[in-house]
Image (spheres, grey):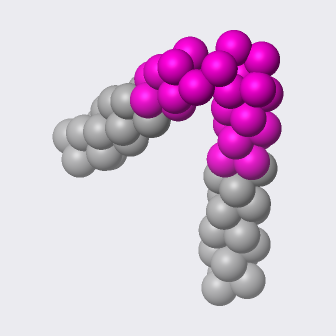
Amino acid sequence: MLASKFFSLSVKASGAMLFAIGIAVVEMALIKIFGDGIGYSVLVTFIALAIVAWRRTAVDQAG
């Protein structure tokens, strides 16, 4: 049981890391192609969406 929980947590952490790396690659490409303004605007949007999704998940799990 303990190994199963550890493996599950490891998979979730790896997935989150890959997602973050993917966002970073997209951001670097957007900044290089369109300039700082567009790239940083998209980054702020990604962060805002992540916060909203996290809050919704926390609320859904609580109630």
Query: Nearest the camera: 13 or 22?
Result: 22
Q: Please give the name of the residue rendered at 69% of the width and 14% of the height, measured from the top-left corner.
A: 34
Decide whether residue 27 is among the magenta residues. yes
Query: Nearest the camera: 63 or 18?
Result: 18
Q: Please give the name of the residue rendered at 72% of the width and 70% of the height, measured from the top-left corner.
A: 10
* 57 displayed left or right of 17: left
Q: Please give the name of the residue rendered at 66% of the width and 62% of the height, measured from the top-left corner.
A: 13
Q: Where is residue 51 shown, x and y percent of the image?
A: 36, 37
Number of callouts in the render?
A: 0
Q: Where is residue 23 shown, x and y percent of the image?
A: 68, 36
Most distant residue in the bottom direction: 2
Decide whether residue 53 is among the magenta residues. no
Chief SS of the magenta region: helix
Query: Nearest the camera: 28 or 13?
Result: 28
Q: Is residue 45 above or below residue 27?
A: above
Residue 8 can be seen in this image: no
Q: Please give the name of the residue rendered at 64% of the width and 68% of the height, measured from the top-left corner.
A: 9
Q: Where is residue 60 shown, x and y percent of the image?
A: 30, 36
Give, as a single range, the part of the protein colored magenta.
20-46
Query: Nearest the camera: 26 or 56?
Result: 26
- Which quadrant: the C terminus? top left
Residue 58 quadrant: top left
Residue 52 can be seen in this image: yes
